[in-house]
Image (cartoon, grey):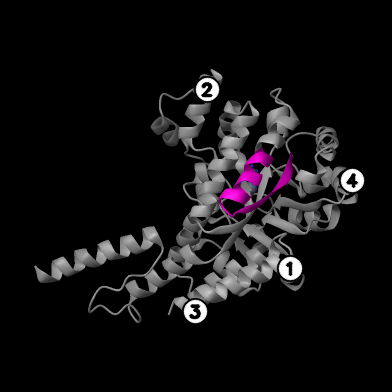
Amino acid sequence: MADNCQSIGWQITVITGMMYGFAIRPAGQPIPGTIRGAMLMIDTLITRLPKCELHIHIEGSLEPELMFALARRNGISLPYASVEAVRQAYQFSNLQDFLDIYYQGMSVLITEQDFYDLAWSYLERARADNLVHVEMFFDPQGHTARGVEFSTVINGLHRAIVDARQALGVRASLIMCFLRHLDEADAEKTLDAALAFKDRIVGVGLDSSEAGHPPSKFKRVFNRARNAGFFLSAHAGEEGPPSYIWEALDVLGVARIDHGIRAMEDQVLVGRLAREKTALTVCPLSNLRLRVVDDMAKHPLRRMLDKGLMVTVNSDDPAYFGGYVNQNYRAVSDALGLDRDEIVAIVRNGIQASLMTPSEKNEAFAEINRVLATIP
Ligand code: ADE
Ligand code: ZN
């Protein structure tokens, strides 16, 4: 009985620690040296370290509750009876299955305030996960194709970013993605529209259906974006083959690869990515939910670290894949047994690979050291 009480007490302590992000040591129960103690230490580390998110599609942070609220506000009817029914529908066999539902979900975003509310909700979550800096993808073609002005999208997102910096202390910037299932002419028109908002967009990316749409399809528009001074990244090697990663690097000239996990099928490519310290924005829960990996225990992230790749951990589309950044860290570290040094290395990679200024990076690295000093 006494044992039972102690065990229940311990569980409550662990759960409380996990919720609030600090380690409580129950009387007479040393944490160091036990498996539970190690797990709690990893969890505390994940919660408390200052982190960056470099791969989040803001439209993929649209939680069903907000989807319903915006649908009501805009007089749009959704093909779901309830929030629970929406969540039930989130069963995907592959990327395209997800994208079909993702584009449908976006249809509730109409006004500048809708885009503000979307970004603000995400940035509050980012604060809760102790993110200090976010690089946020958005898909303007998913909105302009429905008659929503480019300026409506950018004004709403930007206003939320300004407010979040002030009220939450989270820094965020915008990376505009081209939808690769559309043609390059459409991407060119989108770039033309973006040039008027150059001061509010830091970069250009490439997303949507990967198979059959190689990066080289967008060579000219990426060239123009580079000349206009945008940072460049592209989704490659999520479902597509390693050759798409080569193309993203050599034809588009991107500085960062989004996902990139299929690089592991090509050891020459792995060598190059490691040598050039090209950051890969890996999204473990996304990979599981889109069946790019069939079991988190088989996720290549650990092997990627072992090969010296600059791996970062991100959420991709958290409302659809069941977890924000900290949940991605937890899922992958539980499944692969990542240790303290590995977690810290990934967090540092995210900071190093970000577009923060050198002094902002130094401040984040110093904060990591301060946090580490408090966690034995
Ligand atoms: N758009 C939103 N999420 C995406 C993903 N995981 N891959 C490609 N395009 C996306
Ligand atoms: Zn993505």
Q: CA distance from mark 1 to mark 4?
A: 27 Å
Q: Nearer the viewer, mark 4 or mark 3?
A: 3
Residue placed under numbered mark 2 in the picture: 73
Which element is circle 3 on?
helix
**Residue 54, magenta (yes or no):** no
Q: Amino acid at mark 2?
A: Arg
Disc on res. 373: 3
Which element is circle 2 on?
helix
Which element is circle 4 on?
helix
Q: Residues within 10 Å of mark 1 (few under 14, many from 20)?
A: few
Identify the image quadrant of residue 257.
bottom right
Residue 208 visible at all: no
Earlier sequence position, callout 2 versus callout 4 = 2
Earlier sequence position, callout 2 versus callout 1 = 2
Q: Amino acid at mark 4?
A: Arg
Q: Is residue 297 left or right of residue 185?
A: left
Residue 259 % position (x, y): 64, 55
Image point (69%, 24%), residue name: 146
Residue 214 % position (x, y): 77, 46
Residue placed under numbered mark 4 in the picture: 224
Using the image as rendered, state which of residue 357 and residue 75 is in the foreground.
Answer: 357
Q: Which quarter of the rendering shows the C terminus? A: bottom left
Disc on res. 358: 1
Residue 223 in the image: above or below residue 85: below
Q: Nearer the viewer, mark 1 or mark 4?
A: 1
Q: CA distance from mark 4 to mark 3?
A: 46 Å
Q: Amino acid at mark 1?
A: Pro
